[in-house]
Amino acid sequence: MAHYKVVEKFISLNGEGILVGQPAVFIRFHGCNLSCSFCDTSWANEKDTTYDFMTEEEIYEYIKGTGIKNVTLTGGEPLLVPNIAELLHLLSLDTCLHVEIETNGSIDLSPFAIIPNSPSFTMDYKLPGSLMEDKMLVSNFEILSQKDTVKFVVGSREDLNRAREVIYDYDLTSKCHVLISPVYGKIKLDEIADYLIKHRMNNVAMQLQMHKIIWGPDRRGV
């Protein structure tokens, strides 16, 4: 029986994404293969971070016990977790759940997209400011569908320009939801808003991390 390293499990509101503002249950897994310059959960990837070992059945029972249907699997990088497909298969059997995976854009999504009642993906595309753009798998864009999202986290005008280039080069707005999100405290919000308006970026939405606005940028478990 598989065991999973869970560093956090909690109930909150979706702070971002297309379900922003809705209650959700979050499962945060240990470990990541990237080191983004702006990472706000790097503590979850450190070797000395404490975590609980949980089976897929224990995770499912925790989720069901919350009474909440929106489930976000995050990290770290959840798709790196050994045997994560087994957990996804189990969760997919419960059609009352809406399962979303937050993934960093460096992992091939194809093995997970074929799971019946597959989860929705919120996939980051790492921009120059992250120092991780060379790790991105653009082949994933062909796997995404209307239930999925590509998120660009921007910290500068260079990041905005690169995001616009990728969005148009791969015609992302015809495939999935597209979101632009600021690096917290790094770029002025009106700069992003003015940029989207100036460049007529139709079907691209600016989002804020609502949980940081409500509870502050450093609080965990929200």
Image: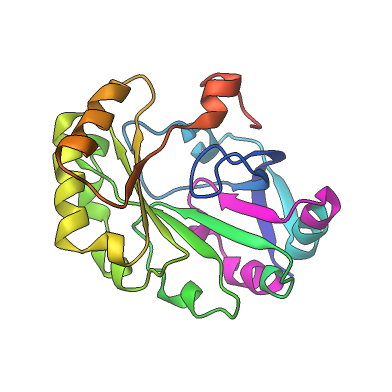
User: Residue 59 location, x and y as percent?
Assistant: 75, 57
Residues 220 and 190: in front is: 190
Residue 204 position, x and y percent, is 31, 48
The residue at the point 82 percent across, 51 percent down is: 67
- The residue segment tinted magenta is 63-90
Q: Quadrant of residue 142?
A: bottom left
Horizontal arrangement in the rendering, residue 31 relative to residue 158 (left or right): right
Q: Position of residue 41 (x, y in %)?
A: 49, 34
Q: Is residue 71 left or right of residue 217?
A: right
Q: Report the residue that reaches farthest toward the right.
A: 65
Give above or below for 54 relative to 1: above
Q: Quadrant of the C terminus?
A: top right
113 to 39, vertically: above or below = below
Kindly identify the residue that appears in the image at 74 percent across and 66 percent down: 96
Q: Is residue 115 magenta?
A: no
Nearer the observer, 54 or 72: 72
| Residue 67 located within the stretch drawn in magenta | yes
Residue at position x 35%, y 29% from top?
Answer: 183
Q: Quadrant of residue 55?
A: bottom right
Quarter that holds the N terminus: bottom right
How was this image coloured?
rainbow
